[in-house]
Image: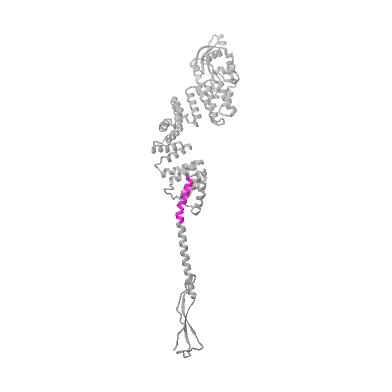
Amino acid sequence: MSQISGARLPYKDFSPGRHSVYQMNLQRTQYSSVTGPGTDGCRALKLVARPCILPSSSNSVTLTSYIILGALALFIFVGAYYFVVSLAGPKKIEEIENLISRGKYKDAIVLLNRMLEKDDRNMKAVYLLGLCHQKTGDYSNAILNYRRCTKIAKYSPETPEPEVRKRLADSQLSIGNYTEAKNEYLILTQVQPDNYENYYEVGKLFQRGGLQPKAIKFLTQATRLNPAHADSWCALGQAHFQMNNYQEARNALQTATQLAPSDANAHYYLGLTLRFLQDGEGALKALEKALKDEDLKPRVILTRGLVMMDQKSYIQAVAEFQRALKLVDKKSDMFLQLHYMAAAAAELNRDMHTAIEHWEKLNSIKPDYRDVAQKLKQYSDFRTDDSIKDFMIASGAQFEAVTRKMIENMGFSINQINMNRDTAITALVSETDAMKRANRRFYALFYLQRDLNTVSENQMREFHEQMKERGAQRGVFMTVGEFAPAAIEFAGNRPIELFDSAAIVEHVRGAMS
């Protein structure tokens, strides 16, 4: 009978790193001699339990396990990454906004650029980048990023379209792109049809471009949407003023000054408007309130001087112009204009010394300024001859006395004499020398004016008509100014003798000596 001996039970090895599967192996063993009962010298099978490593199929199972575990680990890692990013993103935007609120725009720009490298369509990041560039004065890059926002067009409460377009328009204004800015505000009037500010801005830009009718249209709408907005009324008044709509300008500007009593600009334009409406006193009152603005002050004083000239208060006008000269840059156009107006007011007051002084100053700065060279030429004798200066500034009574002496020195006897204001004298005179010998008396009409206004053809025609009405066979027209070519041509075909500034000098000297 066969005997099974040496049997071993299966076991597992739990040592670390070892994962073996064991199976029972039957092993045949032959003993050389077996004694004992039941052996009968026969061979016996010996059942032995041994550990053994799985074949190739077992190795394949192990590799699959590794792949599954690796995939699971990768999934967990990626999920964790995106979870962290989702938490870190908003926090990072908040940190950037905090930097912006503290004025650290350059630091914010660095972080925003890094953020946009990962997502260049991040609307809020692009908007904040534009904002940072705008705050630092880099308007070109600000415009670039705001335009990117309009292309992305993912507007939200954090980046609303009106805010983006308004900042884009403001950046355009900062670099003088007025047309581009106007186009953005025009879009805003469609996006926000009830927002008066957009209509106001469009109106101002049309006004700047000289398109006053369009400016009036948008500014009127702004005042309708917000009747309490003083700036809209002021701009509307200015637009009407530029169109010579003085009544409408006055109404708008008066509303502006009522809403904003401290608005010097509104008072200034109201003063300008009232001047053209021939309300001199009202103009001076409005301009007085505008004097509080130091930047406007020279222009306000200039306008006050013009109002005084309108009122024929020439001495006060000269004083105003000279006062303003102390406030302006000597290299500015305003400096030249004030000198010119001071000379004009002095000339009208026949203060030739003051007038010439201002003309000479202008000539030394800019010889071709307006008609300064012509004025100095006309008054060349007055610049060196005191008797001529005295004649120009003489009182009305002195002016008449000198004129009488001039008429007598020319061989006339005076029949009638009339003073027109205190700048011109008309006299009906008679010639008594050759005509007296012929027992006939011939009359002449004598006219002398002591202002520099050029004598026109119409003025000469009127003089000729007066000759006919008063029965004068001859005319004598004298002026310290000049004659227009047409006036000279008209007189050339008629019995009218002309004396211009050069010809009158000797007669004045003779009468003043």
Question: Residue 183 appears at what percent x and percent y?
Answer: 46, 43
Report which quarter residue 212 is drawn in: top left
Rendering coords of residue 423 (x, y %): 51, 18
Q: Quadrant of the N terminus?
A: bottom left
Q: Residue furthest front?
A: 36
| In magenta stretch: residue 97 | yes
Nearer the observer, 142 or 463: 142
| Residue 477 visible at all | no
Q: Is residue 377 visible?
A: yes
Nearer the observer, 217 or 430: 217
Tell whether position 143 is magenta: no
For the C terminus, the quadrant is top right
Report the magenta residues as a range: 84-101
Viewer-proximal residue among 426 and 361: 361
Q: Is residue 355 above or below residue 414?
A: below
In which image quadrant can residue 402 be found? top right
- Farthest-out residue, right: 384
